[in-house]
Amino acid sequence: MAVEEKIEALLAQMTLDEKIGQMTQVRHFDDVSVEDIQTKFIGSVIHTQGPLPGVDAAAWQDKFNAFQRQALSTRLGIPLIFGVDAVHGQNTYEGATIFPHNIGLGAANNAELVEKAATITAIESKATGFNWVFSPCVAIPFNEKWGRVYEAFSESTDITTQLTKASVKGHQGPNGNSGVMATAKHFIGDGSTDYGVEGGNTTLSEEEVMKRLLPPYQGAIEAGIASIMASFNTLHEVPMHAHKELLTGLLKETLGFQGILVSDWKAYSRFGQNAIINAGVDVVMAVDGDLDMFQEGVKKGVLEGEIPEERIDDAVRRILRQKFRFGVFDNPFPDKSLIQKIGIPEHRAVAKQAVRESLVLLKNENNILPLKKSSKIVVVGAFAHNSGLQSGGWTVNWQGTEENYAGATTILEGIQRLAGQEVIYDMDGSATVEDADVAIVVVGEKPYAEFFGDIGGEMNLFQLTLTEDHQQYIQTYAAKGIPTVVVMISGRPLVVTDQINLSDAFVAAWLPGSEGDGIAEVLFGQFDFKGKLPHSWPKSIADFDGKYGPNYWDTSITPLFPIGFGLTYR
């Protein structure tokens, strides 16, 4: 029997409750019991911040297997799918390979490398029990004040589109269904809100939206993307989750998207309840208390004629289609043999290559780089020896971690490995060091995710410049007359014009992930710099006086460095 025939046969047998169940995504542990999977006909589960499924990957698989057995014991035996925010590797599992965040991959601009990284992410996600990842983010950031700039590849539509296609292919496998379900997010306008506010209002014209923001989604659909996630932002004050013209009219009808349109967190209660279903949302994250409200509200909506049952049937068809496509009916349980592949050297070698190719050299006065092994080196700053700080948000925890985590190497460890003599480590810039040949000062932003990273937003925890402490590290060593190389760890370009002027060399290292020693390999000249800026680089705070920061298409603001800039040794 053909897949579509199987879908229709199942659909014909389903009650309204079973259909709504397939549209329901819950967070395990906090929101439901194992028994709820069977009684509420749950269709999918998301793992995110909260209690871990177990102490190791085998225990994670066992926990998900218990859920799956409940799903398979229902009348129709429709299996669950398990989703995770694996945005730069399987970043919820400590010990997995963690790649540079997408902004770094955008700097590398190597589609083959992006595909390899996504392939490895799929393997390590499947090894921990997942078959659906909420990646890649294909936003086009217009303002560095946005707290999710690092989740996107570039401000360039062309770069983003090409790397999106590679990411989808890597995640989903060369034949389109042997990996995990990928998700393009967040549709549409999330990175181009006015003043860079997460979930804010996007006022770009329809022409600009179609020209600048839509192509990555078109590329994802052409590549066979399994799902697309709706965005928190509004477009001309209309919530995207309730924007039927774009969700159904554009995505599903005009562009022919056949996959699952999934909501973002708590979208049902946040954006109009049944309005988001009628707009085209197929799977709802019914989390944090939304479960009963969602299931009861949608059922009432159908029975009272507010929601056409054909809309429900369309959603269920799309869900079942992907479950059949990715073999979940035939192989509902994870493969234990994959566990041994988590964080293996072959995977870390690809991540280290991504680190090396992502680095952008902004300044190299008097050829201070590459470092000489004979040099007496002092390394400055806590960021130099902390894998959590170098990895950013969505690493082990939602908001990242400020501690070292399993399997990672730090920048300092890489320098120590390659240096010809003992390296001095000055963690807080207070050491008495006067005779070093070179100081490597590692500075940057502490980890953040989503609205916590917005500059000037409701949390307002971050700024467009380095902290005073980090600025002082650079000033201290420059004042000593010691040649100073600055390595900046950040999720976005920052206003560091004065610090660039003070330094002898300046490297934008983005958020490199678990393989920090890859930075040292480039600093010592084992590899040349390849990275090019994926964003225009601001010269002053005044660059952000308007809705947006400097962008390659906006000639009204002259950046300090244009998109595509990057020096090399040769």
Image (cartoon, helix red, strand yellow):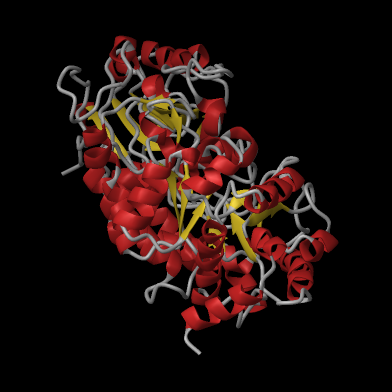
State left or right for residue 69 relative to residue 112. Answer: right
412 up-or-down from 553: above or below: below
Residue 544 visible here:
yes
- Report the side of 530 relative to 139 (left or right): left
Where in the figure is residue 271, as x and y percent of width and height?
56, 35
Side (left or right) of 531 relative to 44: left
Task: State how many labels appear.
Answer: 0
At a point 58% along the width and 35% down the height, the residue shown is: 272
Image location (x, y in percent) of residue 252: 38, 56
**Residue 163 vertical position relative to residue 365 in the rendered view, above or below:** below
Tell me the residue at 75%/40% (across/down): 289
Viewport quadrant of the C terminus: top left
| Viewer-nearest residue: 167 or 338 | 167
Outermost residue on the front side: it is 304
Image coordinates for residue 219, horizontal then vertical, percent = 29, 56
Image height check: is 135 above or below 502? below
Q: What residue is drawn where x is 35% and y is 18%?
A: 495
Instruction: Looking at the picture, tell me which residue is in the foreground, 358 or 568.
Output: 358
Q: Residue at x 59, y 46 (%)?
A: 306
Q: Taking 27 as reference, is 434 above or below it?
A: above
Instruction: Give x and y (percent) for residue 444.
Output: 47, 27
Q: Is residue 418 visible?
A: no
Query: Left or right of 470: which side holds 18?
Result: right
